[in-house]
Image: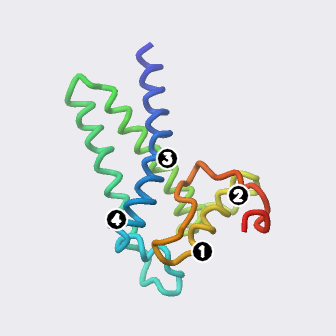
Amino acid sequence: MTAIIYILTTLAAIAGMEFVAWFAHKYIMHGWLWRWHEDHHKPHYEKHGFFEKNDLFFLVFAIPSMFCYIAGLATPHRWLLFVGIGISIYGLIYFLIHDVYIHRRFKWFRQLDGDYSRAILRAHGAHHAKTTKEDCESFGLLVVDPKYFKKRSAWK
């Protein structure tokens, strides 16, 4: 029974991170930490080098995960370990979809041909259509507005 609780805790943490990431993207990255996120919205030809200031957010999200690993192993609150694992898994999913698949920062696999993968690309494309912090849409990654499952002309 304990294993099932830990699995469910991990899955809940993964699901919860989508909403944490949405909130952080909308209100922190496009808010008071825009100076870190701004270079991510610039065209590739304006960037200088492989890394972006936006990559600092990897560390921001790694800190709570690390805390959960340490607290879960050092205290009787073992469930915190599985929250940390869930945050880490979400981070891996985010990295693979956002940095590898969408932005092609690593050429590890080709574009997928499915309704969901196309909707993710459309939603992210709509988000990057703006190069300023205001008036952006689609701040999540995995939860995609149904309008992006339709052809572009349907959601303009």
Residue found 44% across the figure and 32% down from its top: 10
Q: Are marks 2 and 3 in contact (CB under 8 Å)?
A: no
Q: Is residue 27 above or below residue 38?
A: above
Residue found 38% across the figure and 32% down from its top: 82
What colour-coding does the image apply? rainbow
* Gap in angstroms between the C-alphas marked 1 and 3: 22 Å
Q: Is residue 25 above or below residue 128?
A: above
Q: Farthest left residue?
A: 74
Q: Are marks 1 and 4 in contact (CB under 8 Å)?
A: no
- Residue 103: image quadrant is bottom right
Per the image, the residue denoted by label 3 is 18
Q: Say which amino acid is labelled 4.
A: Leu
Q: Secondary structure at mark 2?
A: helix
Per the image, the residue denoted by label 2 is 148
- How many C-alpha atoms fall within 10 Å of the one at disc 3: few (<14), some, or many (≥20)? many
* Gap in angstroms between the C-alphas marked 2 and 1: 14 Å
Per the image, the residue denoted by label 1 is 129
Earlier in the chain: of badge 1 and badge 3, it is 3
